Structure formats: structure tokens, C-alpha cells
Amino acid sequence: EDIGIPAVFPVHSLAKIEVADWWLVGRISTASGSLYVQRESKESRSEAGETIEKELGKGKNIALYPEGGCKGRRIFESFRYGAFDISLRTGVPILPVFLHYESQDDFEWREPQTLLHKIWHMMTSRNRRANYYVYDAFDPGQFSDKAAYAEYAHAKYLEWQARYLD
């Protein structure tokens, strides 16, 4: 995600602060203009939200993952509200991209794997193909609040999961 999405789309990714220190991926992530957040810090999340709003105001595209990180091979039980709140406040639509690794098992992060383990799994996978399905943008004007917006987006991702993964 941290390399693939920026390679295919003109975006700046939001990533956990730890990514900046990862060998190779951290350098690529930083060079591509990633924004970083310390997930456990409310202050950091607030600052990241302000930075995202400023970047959107400049016409930049931001890639983020509404589940709040890698949660396994399937869509997590809920999405966080931050992106949806920003979209409502700014009027900037969200363009959903469903990411599908054909060899899901090889690409799933599991404890206690390290970045080197993941790179090895990806390089030796029987199928390294990643598919990016781009759907029509979600118009924030269709939603009254961030919870309804997030629930709608989550339901759409569950539909796409059923189509591509189940």
C-alpha cells in the first residue's frame, strides 16, 4: 500500500509514524511525500487532520486507510471517522479504491513478522499481482454526519470484498 498506491496514483499517503523508520520503505514513503501520524496520540491525529485539510485545499490527493491500519485479509469491522469528517467539512469527495492482492495469504501482515519478512513473502509469492479497483467518488453532500458517511463507505467495501475476495 505504501509503495503501490503512490506508484499508481498521484497521492500523498497517511502512514503511521513508524513507517518513516522502516528500511527502504521509509525512505520511499518519505520521498513520495507521505504524511505521518502517531496513532496513539490524539494531538498527532488532530495535527494530521489539519495537515490533510491544508493539502486538500492546495489540490493535493491524500491516500489513507479508514480502518486505521492493516487488520488482516478482510475488511475490518468498522471504519474510523476522521477521513469522513474532513470530507464533510471541506466538501472534498472521497474516491474509493479497493485493493485486492490475488495471493491474499502472502500479503497479509501477521505477528511477529517484520518488514523484511513481508518483503521476502512478496518477492517469493506465487502471485504478486495487486488489483486496484477505482469506484465513483462518494459525495459528502449525500450524508448528514460522519457516522452515516463511514457506515455507507464500509458497506460498499464489504460489497467489493464479497465480489473480489469471497
Image (tube, grey):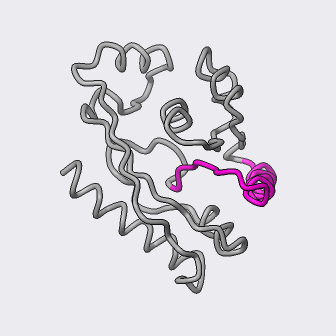
Q: Where does residue 90 sit, x and y in percent of width and height?
A: 72, 71
> Would residue 38 appear left or right of 166 to someone viewing this image?
right
Looking at the rendering, which quadrant does residue 139 occupy? bottom right
Q: How many badges with numbers are in the image?
A: 0
* Residue displayed at 32% across by 49% down: 74
* Residue displayed at 39% across by 30% down: 110
Looking at the rendering, which quadrant does residue 89 occupy? bottom right
Q: Where does residue 41 sit, x and y in percent of width and height?
A: 75, 49
Q: Residue furthest bottom?
A: 144
**Within the magenta stretch, is there residue 50?**
yes
* Residue displayed at 38% across by 51% down: 98
> Would residue 149 appear left or right of 47 to someone viewing this image?
left
Q: Where does residue 164 sit, x and y in percent of width and height?
A: 23, 50
Q: Is residue 104 above or below residue 49?
A: above
Span highlighted in magenta in the image: 41-66
Residue closer to the observer: 35 or 141: 141
Q: Where does residue 85 sit, x and y in percent of width and height?
A: 65, 70
Q: Residue furthest left?
A: 166
Residue closer to the observer: 127 or 60: 60
**Within the magenta stretch, is there residue 160?**
no
Residue closer to the observer: 114 or 7: 7
> Would residue 66 appear left or right of 55 to someone viewing this image?
left
Q: Please name the predominant secondary structure of the magenta segment in the image.
A: helix
Q: Is residue 159 above or below residue 133?
A: below
* Residue displayed at 56% across by 61% down: 80
> Would residue 76 appear left or right of 22 to someone viewing this image?
left
Q: Is residue 144 above or below residue 89?
A: below
